[in-house]
Amino acid sequence: MWTTSSFRADALVVGMALTAACTTAAVAPEAPRAPVRSVMAEGKPAGPRSPLEGPLEVGAASIRPAAAEPALLQRFGQLPYRSEDLLVVDVQIQRPLGDLARSALPVILLNERPILSTIVVDQTRLLAVVRVTEVPRGEVVVAVTRLGDSTVRSRNRFVVQVP
């Protein structure tokens, strides 16, 4: 008979536990959580922009065979193509680039196509290498932008003859 009375006590404890669990759980464990406010979602502060964040204006540009510039090719490290198959795009910028650790990477544009091999030589000079087959013969329009931020695209464009 002791098992019957023990069963009633256990059922009472289990019932109380279920009642407590149902009343305290306001949200299911798998339910979506409330959105967390993120600093990244707010964007940049509305304060004054730095003059270095403006458009990158091209001061001068040239395209020449890479075989004539072996010292410049060393800056790019190991390249998968022969120097005879490459062209060097050299761009001078009118204003310094600023702090590259805090801003988007500058990229040279040829006919509105970004050259991802662009490197920064100094604060006012950019270099890139392209394959000869990727550049059309004749005139090419050279501009500069910042990778990931097309709002700072250069307003002036240079038309350069491809050798």
Image (tube, rainbow, N blue to C red):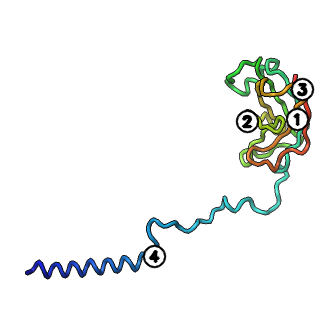
Distance between the alpha carbons at the discs numbered 2 and 1? 16 Å
- Tag 4: Cα neighbours inside 10 Å, few (<14), some, or many (≥20)? few
Instruction: Name the residue type under label 2.
Output: Leu
Distance between the alpha carbons at the discs numbered 2 and 3? 22 Å
Give how far across and how far down residue 73 sits, in percent.
75, 23
Distance between the alpha carbons at the discs numbered 3 and 4? 70 Å
Observer-side mark, 3 or 1, equals 3
107 over 132 or under it: above or below:
below
Lower sequence index among marks 1 and 4? 4
Lower sequence index among marks 3 and 4? 4
Element marked by disc 3: strand
Q: Quadrant of the N terminus?
A: bottom left
* Residue at 88 percent of width and 43 percent of height: 57
Task: Give the label on residue 141, or none.
Answer: 1
Q: Which residue is mark 2?
A: 116
Instruction: Name the residue type under label 1.
Output: Val
- Tag 1: Cα neighbours inside 10 Å, few (<14), some, or many (≥20)? some
Give how far across and how far down residue 156 sits, in percent.
91, 42
- Tag 2: Cα neighbours inside 10 Å, few (<14), some, or many (≥20)? some
Tell me the quarter of the picture where residue 116 sits: top right
Lower sequence index among marks 2 and 3? 2
Task: Give the label on residue 26, or none.
Answer: 4
